[in-house]
Image: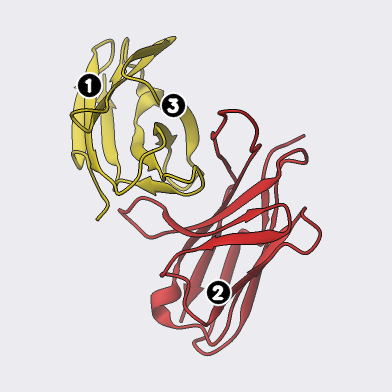
Amino acid sequence: GQNIDQPTEMTATEGAIVQINCTYQTSGFNGLFWYQQHAGEAPTFLSYNVLDGLEEKGRFSSFLSRSKGYSYLLLKELQMKDSASYLCAAGNQAGTALIFGKGTTLSVSS
Amino acid sequence: DTGVSQNPRHKITKRGQNVTFRCDPISEHNRLYWYRQTLGQGPEFLTYFQNEAQLEKSRLLSDRFSAERPKGSFSTLEIQRTEQGDSAMYLCASSFGGGNSYEQYFGPGTRLTVT
C-alpha cells in the first residue's frame, strides 16, 4: 500500500522556526519531495531528497531517513508569506507519479 | 517561457455534459502529468505521458476520462458524462526526464464545478 502522513495544521509566529514532519510507506520509492501551495494556487517545488541526510536551501531545509520512512521540512525565520499548505510527496519507483500527502496548513502570525 | 499553462481556469458544467481541458507544458519538457485535487487533500495522480506515449494511468482514471498528447507537446483531458464527484481542481505538471531530475512544475489548474 501507499501512505503519506503529515500533520493537518501547524501554527507559528514570525521569526520562529517550524519543523513539518512526514512519514511515508510506499511500495516503491524514488525520492521525497516537498511542495508549497498557497490557497487557490498551484503547488511550487521546494526540495527533493533521494539520499539520507539534510539538504539546505536558504531558509528551508529538508531531511530524509529512508530506513525510517521519515522526512521533515524545516522553515527558519518564518515570514507571514510562509503561511501556506506544505505537501510531502514520494516519487514512485518508476520516477513518474508523485504520491502526495494531504498537506500541512501552516499559519504564521505576527 | 512562462511555465505550465492550463485552459480554461474555471469550468462550470451540468451533470452529464462532456468537458475538455488543455495543458501546455514547459516547452523543453518531455514528461507531462495530470493530477486531481479536492479541497483539503493533496493532488492525486491520474496519468503520465512521456512525449506522446501515455505510459501510466491511475485506477482513478475511469472509462469516462481520456487524455491525449498527440504531438508530444500540449495535452488534453476529457471527462465524458460528468458527475458531481468530478468537481475538483485538475492540475497539469511537466518535467524534463533527464538524469535524476524529477522535479515537476505545476500549472495553475482548471477548477471544475459540476452542478
Q: Do the residues labelled 1 and 3 touch (CB within 8 Å)?
A: no
Do callouts 1 and 2 point to residues on the same chain? no
Query: Disc 3 marks which amino acid?
Result: Tyr
Chain letter, colour red? B
* Kind of element beneath mark 1: strand
Query: Residue B26's x, y, as percent?
Result: 72, 41
At 58% from the left edge and 87% from the top edge, which residue is drawn? B17
Residue A75, compared with residue B108, is above or below; it is above
Instruction: Please state the horizontal and vertical placement of residue B32, each as a whole percent of the image.
Output: 63, 50
The residue singled out by tag 2 in the image is B12
Front-lying residue, B110 or B45: B45
Looking at the rendered image, the quarter that the N terminus of chain A falls into is bottom left
Left or right, B11 with reference to A88: right
Label 3, residues with CA under 10 Å away: few <14, some 14-19, many ≥20? many
The numbered disc on residue A19 is 1
Badge 2 sits on which subunit?
Answer: B
Q: Are marks 3 and 2 in contact (CB under 8 Å)?
A: no
Residue toward you, A84 or B101: B101
Mark 3, residue position: A48
Determine if marks 3 and 2 fall on one subunit: no
Q: In this view, does B15 lie above or below B11?
A: below
How far apart are the alpha carbons under marks 1 and 3? 16 Å
Q: Identify the residue at the far right of this view.
A: B71
Name which residue type carries label 1: Gln
